[in-house]
Image (spheres, grey):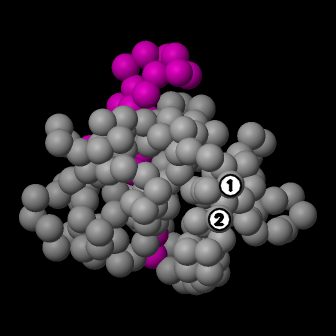
């Protein structure tokens, strides 16, 4: 989604968004029913890592990383089970929305307002001028992001302090 402003090579070499500290497990991606079906159809992927659930009468899944940590450190990172040596193993149909829109997040503020926010931890996006990012989101992505979030309200994250609101 952001390939017009982020270089694929920068993202592929970084992979920051493909590992999760215990303190950031709320960021673990959520897969929709469509993603789950596509993963099941791919014989090269291990669908057993997904933990399915239903919300708003729609099927979703995530994965449990708790058994992947080797220490008790809250700063230790556990990689996504779909991260391979050459990058993400998922194709576009299999990849969850959270991953497709990273480092953006659609979030719900305490007053109920839904916003598009930028994570403060993405090294690549933080090298760009914030006004460039803001303009890109507002002119190219905003309507699609809000529409998808409205169709899948479970994917909306609660707003966290430190996330820069773009729209």
Give whichever of 59, 7 is nearer the camera.
Answer: 7
The furthest residue to the right: 111
Give whichever of 41, 123 is nearer the camera.
Answer: 123
Q: How many labels does the image show?
A: 2
Q: Tags 2 and 1 in contact by the CB under 8 Å rule? A: yes
Quadrant (top left/top right/bottom left/bottom right) for the N terminus: bottom left
Which label is found at residue 131?
1
**Circle 1: element type:** helix
Q: Can I make out residue 141 in this image?
A: yes
Question: Badge 2: how crowded within 10 Å, few (<14), some, or many (20+)?
Answer: some
Which residue appears at 62% of the width and 46% of the height? 129
Q: Position of residue 28 (x, y in %)?
A: 49, 49
Q: Is residue 133 magenta?
A: no
Residue 93 placement, left or right of 73: left
Which residue appears at 43% of the width and 72% of the height? 32
- Residue at image mark 2: 135
Q: In which quarter of the image is residue 109?
A: bottom right
Residue 72 placement, left or right of 167: left
Magenta span covers which residues? 59-83
Q: Position of residue 116 (x, y in %)?
A: 68, 63
Quadrant (top left/top right/bottom left/bottom right) for the C terminus: bottom right
Tell me if residue 127 comes above or below residue 166 in the rendering: above
């Amino acid at each position: 989604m952001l390939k017009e402003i982020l270089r694929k090579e920068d993202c592929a070499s970084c992979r920051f968004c493909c590992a999760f500290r215990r303190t950031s497990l709320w960021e673990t991606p959520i897969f929709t029913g469509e993603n789950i079906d596509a993963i099941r159809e791919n014989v090269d992927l291990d669908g057993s890592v997904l933990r399915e659930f239903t919300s708003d009468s729609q099927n979703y899944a995530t994965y449990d990383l708790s058994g992947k940590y080797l220490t008790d450190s809250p700063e230790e990172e556990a990689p996504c089970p779909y991260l391979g040596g050459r990058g993400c193993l998922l194709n576009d149909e299999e990849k969850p929305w959270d991953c497709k829109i990273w480092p953006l997040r659609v979030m719900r503020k305490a007053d109920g307002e839904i916003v598009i926010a930028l994570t403060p931890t993405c090294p690549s996006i933080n090298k760009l001028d914030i006004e460039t990012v803001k303009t890109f989101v507002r002119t190219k992505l905003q309507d699609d992001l809000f529409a998808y979030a409205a169709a899948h309200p479970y994917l909306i994250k609660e707003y966290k302090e430190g996330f820069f609101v773009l729209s």
